Image: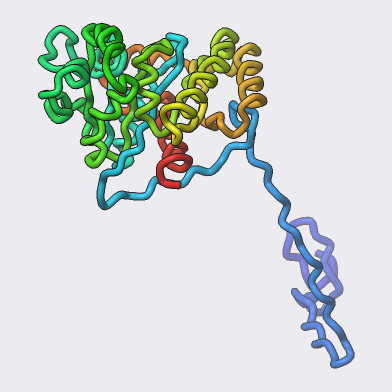
Amino acid sequence: MSGGTFSGFPGSQGSSATEMPPLFSPTAPSPTETDTVSEALPFERPQVERPLGPTGRPMIDLPEPRPLTEHGNARVMAMCNQKGGVGKTTTTINLGAALAEYGRKVLLVDFDPQGSLSVGLGLNPHEMDLTIYNLLMQRDVTVDDVIVPSGVPGMDLLPSNIDLSAAEVQLVHEVAREQTLQRVLGPALANYDVVLIDCQPSLGLLTVNALTAADGVIVPLECEYFALRGVALLKTTIDKVRERLNPKLEIDGLLGTMFDGRTLHSREVMDRLVHAWGDKVFHTVIRRTVKFSDSTVAGEPITSYASNSTGAEHYRQLAKEVLARCLDA
């Protein structure tokens, strides 16, 4: 070993230092009275842009629906579009079920002679003792006689079947024929928060009755070209009903259904819809999913049949938007 005083590691050559250097520097002197501390520079938090939703607009934050301590004074909403196959019945069932999940008492009115709403909730159209036809045409039948449970807690149903097709002919000779549905529904409004009317795919007398009884209209609209063409005609009918029969009637919103964001056609239709109607178009969009067909066969809403599916979540989001826009505002 060489003459060094430290050889702690193999192969080291030693060190002539008499002691190890300090591990840290002495504390820096405190600032004198003449030293000044610079002020903090102003900091602006950058604005985070919201992601765009399927409608091409920034997504909105929807509040959780507030709980209700009492029920009544229902808002009547007609699900209306003269074009068939756009999702009126599917939206009526699933929006109603989602609203019931949020603590609202809901009454669904099947106002289509095809009775699809009743069948979609598991009823047999040939086994109904009383339907909305009896309520419209027989003065000794009350709304409480016809209402049946839907199987969903908080949601009831006024059922229908093919008998309702005769009402359109018979009502022609009645006085104030356009106000018939409004008259018979009146006693039920004190017991519910929301009444959803599933209209037939036409602009006949039954649909005019529904629009006369309603406070607002939701227009389900399939995201394809032919569905766009009929909206102008529907708006003309709504304007006439507002001017002549129901001054309080308004369009609550247009709902894009059967949306497929993978196709350019669906995106273009949605873009034109938003361009023409602006904020009247709901931010929520209902996408295609096979679960809707499966839940219809099962006779229950998608919110209970496939509670965790994307379809169920879309209708819960729609329920929040309807509440924020039309009911809790």
Residue 308: tell me if it is visible.
no
Outermost residue, bottom side? 33
Q: Is residue 214 visible?
A: yes
Residue 307 at x, y = what percent? 33, 28
**Residue nearer the viewer, 96 or 237:** 237
Q: Residue at x 56, y 40 (%)?
A: 60
Rendered view: 163 above or below 88: above
Residue 144 horizontal side relative to residue 292, left or right? left
Q: Quadrant of residue 19?
A: bottom right
Q: Residue 309: x and y, percent?
A: 39, 25
Between residues 73 and 226, which one lies in front from this camera angle?
Answer: 73
Tell me how many marks there are.
Answer: 0
Answer left or right for 297 relative to 216. Answer: left
Residue 68 vs 148, above or below: the answer is below
Locate residue 299, reporting x and y percent. 25, 16
User: Image quadrant of residue 265?
Assistant: top right
Task: Determine which quarter of the picture holds residue 120.
Answer: top left
Q: State the residue at coordinates (47%, 10%).
A: 83
199 vs 28: above or below: above
* Residue at x 34%, y 21% (from the top left corner): 178
